[in-house]
Image (tube, grey):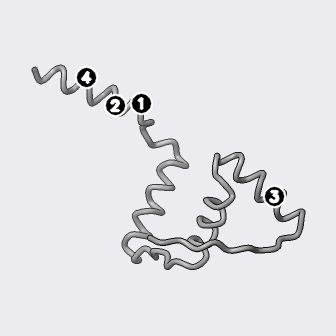
């Protein structure tokens, strides 16, 4: 996609905050501002009522501690794959 250069003026405090965020995320200034504009300008997905129920149920399970961490799940998969040989 072709790009264009844009010059903007920002209050010093806002630029300092932006620079702090970009350093934490290892972004260039351009990457940070592109991401911010995408977030505010591009359409976002809204879950259907059914999806929202599933999301809420999953969050409730996590809150109750009913989840498996990725590393544990990966270990279990390797263990199961090994026992089927």
10 relative to 65 in the view: left or right: right
Res. 74 mark: 2
Q: Secondary structure at mark 3?
A: helix
Q: Which mark is residue 54?
A: none
Q: Which is more foreground, mark 3 or mark 4? A: 3
The residue lying at 56 percent from left, 71 percent from top is 38
User: Looking at the rendered structure, which numbered label has been put on residue 17?
Assistant: 3
Answer whether labels 3 and 4 touch (C-beta < 8 Å). Answer: no
Percent x, y of residue 79: 25, 22
Which mark sits nearer the N-terminus, 3 or 2? 3
Q: Report the quarter where the N terminus lies.
A: bottom left
The first of marks 1 and 3 along the sequence is 3
What residue is drawn where x is 52% and y is 77%?
A: 42
Mark 1, mark 3: which one is toward the viewer? 3
Marks 3 and 4, how far apart in space?
Answer: 47 Å
| Label 4–label 1 contact, CB within 8 A | no
Which residue bears the numbered disc 1? Answer: 71
């Amino acid at each position: 996609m072709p790009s264009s250069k844009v010059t903007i003026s920002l209050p010093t405090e806002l630029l300092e905050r932006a620079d702090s965020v970009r350093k934490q995320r290892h972004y260039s200034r351009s990457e940070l501002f592109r991401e911010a504009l995408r977030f505010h300008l591009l359409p976002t997905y809204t879950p259907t009522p059914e999806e929202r129920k599933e999301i809420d149920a999953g969050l409730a399970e996590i809150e109750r501690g009913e989840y498996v961490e990725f590393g544990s799940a990966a270990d279990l998969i390797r263990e199961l794959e090994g026992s089927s040989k």
